[in-house]
Image (cartoon, coloured by chain):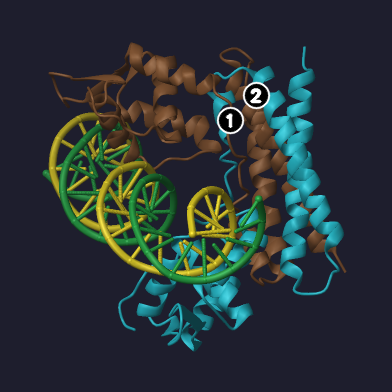
Chain colours: A cyan, B brown, C green, D yellow
Amino acid sequence: MQHEIRLTPTSYIVLGLLDQAGEATPYELKRRVAVGVGNFWSLQHAQLYSEPERLARAGYLTEERETGGRRRKRYAITRRGRAALHEWLAASTPGLAELRDPGLLKLYLGGDPAVLAAAQLEAHERKLREYQRIRAADDGAGPRGPWLTLDAGIGHEREWVRYWRRLRDAR
Amino acid sequence: MQHEIRLTPTSYIVLGLLDQAGEATPYELKRRVAVGVGNFWSLQHAQLYSEPERLARAGYLTEERETGGRRRKRYAITRRGRAALHEWLAASTPGLAELRDPGLLKLYLGGDPAVLAAAQLEAHERKLREYQRIRAADDGAGPRGPWLTLDAGIGHEREWVRYWRRLRDAR
DNA sequence: ACCGTCATGTAATCGGTTACATGATTCT
DNA sequence: AGAATCATGTAACCGATTACATGACGGT
């Protein structure tokens, strides 16, 4: 309830999901991540056990154990947690994202463009189709954020496809 | 010289740069990273001290201390290091990159699209101009990798600009 | 001579990843 | 009933980030 801890993106994902969900167990968080944010910011499932603990100790969440059966831990966001979340949401965003693409790294360090392009192209085309399927299935209800970010994902996948295709066809 | 260590992207960046440079001190590596890979895969400078040590202990690099003045450590890649690098370069690349953009994360978790868009747009426009300046200054000599990845960076920055602009102008 | 900044490095901490492990369920 | 897979969780390790610290050097 007292030590200051540093809040990382992982922290805000947990806070944000709990803010929307009301309360959840780590496993529920895991599933929510998998169908949403996980597409552009993935987490190890173990973090969804350790991070809520950390947040609870610092007073951002409450934790209570179910009494029956699996004795799961259920977490809920506190007023302090909500405050931290909204402060972060409103604060100006510092740096930009980095590409951090393993394929691109290989390209930079001397990998064969043609070989890389072939593999990357196929993977990105597949990913693009997946996103488009998700978007087609979305009925537009629910919060706007997920829909908008999906749109970003599609845009970038298209860009990747363009990029690797040009590279493949070069020369 | 003997323990197995896990090679991370950081490892390959060090190996790759040393492969091109012949040999270097951590500080020289730092500068090379800053003008190149660092644009899409940044590292803490401290890692450029610890990682070469790790690699040297495992036999991928040789390490020798300068005798005079600062007694810097100079590293060079070994045959084993080169082998590991080229094996990695040739191996098929596993997953795709994630966007991992803090602005996008805020958008997903409920941040105000208009506010986010304004800030992000400006930052990405600036970054795009920077890349274009770098490309204009590039004489096309030297290895191809850096030039090609710069191109990827430009493409994605353009996509970000399109994306946030549309978002800003929406409604 | 002093100051500020760049150069260069080490130490401690901690978040994140990997590995391990057991209880439920479903399938054959 | 046994096998396989999903659900759920813990523990250990380690790479990465942060903080700290000192030396060199150029400028005034």
Q: Is residue A66 visible?
A: yes
Query: In the rendering, which numbered label is found on residue B25?
Result: none
The secondary element bearing badge 1 is classed as loop
Label 1 sits on what residue type?
Thr
Nearer to the camera, B112 or B78: B78
The secondary element bearing badge 2 is classed as helix
Reading the image, the residue beneath label 2 is A116
Parent chain of label 1: B
Q: Is residue A36 visible?
A: no
Nearer to the camera, A1 or B156: A1
Q: Residue at x 27, y 32 (%)?
A: B54
Mark 2 in CB contact with mark 1 (< 8 angstroms): yes
Q: Position of residue B98 (x, y in %)?
A: 61, 47
In the image, A106: left or right of B157? left
In the image, B119: left or right of A18? right
Q: Residue at x 64, y 69 (%)?
A: B109
Residue B33 lies in quadrant: top left
Report the quarter where the C terminus of chain B lies: bottom right
Q: Residue at x 41, y 20 (%)?
A: B84
Nearer to the camera, A1 or A133: A133
Report the quarter where the N terminus of chain B lies: top left
In the image, A32: left or right of A87? right
Location of residue C7 with respect to A31 vertically, above or below: above
Q: Position of residue A89 (x, y in %)?
A: 59, 72
Parent chain of label 2: A
Reading the image, the residue beneath label 1 is B93
